[in-house]
Image (cartoon, rainbow, N blue to C red):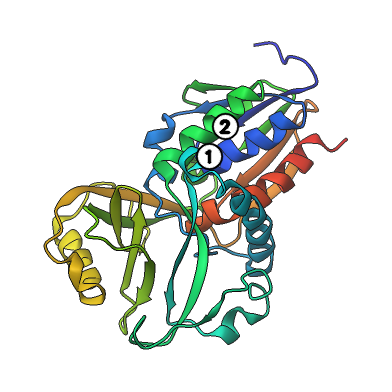
Amino acid sequence: MAQGSSDDVIVVGGGVIGLTTAVVLAESGRRVRVWTRDPVQRTTSAVAGALWWPYHIEPVASARAWALRSLDVYEELAERPAETGVRLVDGVLGETTLDAVAGWASTRLPGLRAATADEYAGTGVWARLPLIDMAAHLPWLRARLLRAGGSVEERTVSGLGRVRAPVVVNCTGLGAHELVPDPSVRPVRGQLVVVENPGIRTWLVSTGPAGEMAYVFPQPDRLLLGGTAEDDVWSTRPDPVVAEAIVRRCSALRPEIAGARVLGHRVGLRPARPTVRLERETLPDGRVLVHHYGHGGAGVTVAWGCAQEAAALATAS
């Protein structure tokens, strides 16, 4: 394949990180193509609970800066929730104190306060945060990319050296484990249960004394119940025993969930890494390769801040 014009960029990976990076590049005037192994509705991002909060991601300082830049975008997108899938929703971060977020988030979240005993039985923080419906948001991102002149192709990449373009951005997430290869990228398995919403309007994240996770995320037509965080587990098959435990933990927090009709089960593999890899290298033939992966469970949270930085690396002279 010919390398193309100097404005050609191929983004490998069609999850939220790849699509957001492609949108930023395309809207800056670059000719961008996304190569994705799976359609957007089958990427790991499609399974995300997608509450804005930096979870399972390092380095912490960079992640918080990326998250705050992304918050600016999500607040604007929340003005058009039916179109973008982004809403600002109230809820409780359990096992969190105001002191824990005072140094970085409190000035951007003016409604932040301690949760009352009626809102949460333990120590928690009440906040209004972006909650993203990925079933709507990912197709919206794809459509925004197309409007900016970009394209999306479903194709499997067997090696980054085979991607012939002046600039290649590697947003392959867990795929980087073999594609780079980068053995430090590993899966953190997350399972959730989708049920009919019995009328819950606020979200809740809680961690039990043994470290077990429970979260309740209301979406427009359903309720997402989670979850798990199993290190180094590659299976994407839902486990019915795990599903029952998830429903049981969430029902203990919100009794009205008990008996809600189950609509489906989802499993996603978070692409964890000791630190996000966001760096540029020049290949022997002069082409630019930007690595942009390893966002753990916070890909949606940091997507726009990270994408802006990745685009700057990709277009730097």
Q: Nearer the viewer, residue 91 or 98?
A: 91
Q: Left of 220 or right of it: where is 115?
A: right
Query: Quadrant of the image for the C terminus?
Result: top right
Residue drawn at (78%, 22%) of the image? 7
Of all residues, the one furthest to the top in this rendering is: 2
Question: Which amino acid lies under the numbered mark 1 shown in the image of this protein?
Answer: Thr
The quarter of the picture where residue 17 lies is: top right
Taking the image as drawn, is residue 132 in sight? yes
Q: CA distance from mark 1 to mark 2?
A: 6 Å
Residue 153 vertical position relative to residue 121 in the rendered view, above or below: above
Residue 6 location (% of width, % of height): 80, 20
Q: Is residue 209 left or right of residue 258?
A: right
Task: Provide the residue designation for mark 1.
Answer: 172
Depth order, front residue of 112/280 = 112
Residue at (26, 61) in percent of width and height: 199
Q: Does any portion of residue 176 appear in the rendered image?
A: no
Which is nearer the eye, 38 or 129?
129
In screen coordinates, is 304 left or right of 209? right
Residue type, label 2:
Val
Residue 224 placement, left or right of 89 = left
Circle 2 Cα neighbour tier, 10 Å, few/some/many (<14 / 14–19 / ≥20): many
Q: Are marks 1 and 2 in contact (CB under 8 Å)?
A: yes
Q: How many numbered discs?
A: 2
**What residue appears at the point 14 percent right and 53 percent down from the top-left corner?**
261
Residue at position x 61%, y 38% in the image? 170
Q: Which residue is mark 2?
A: 12
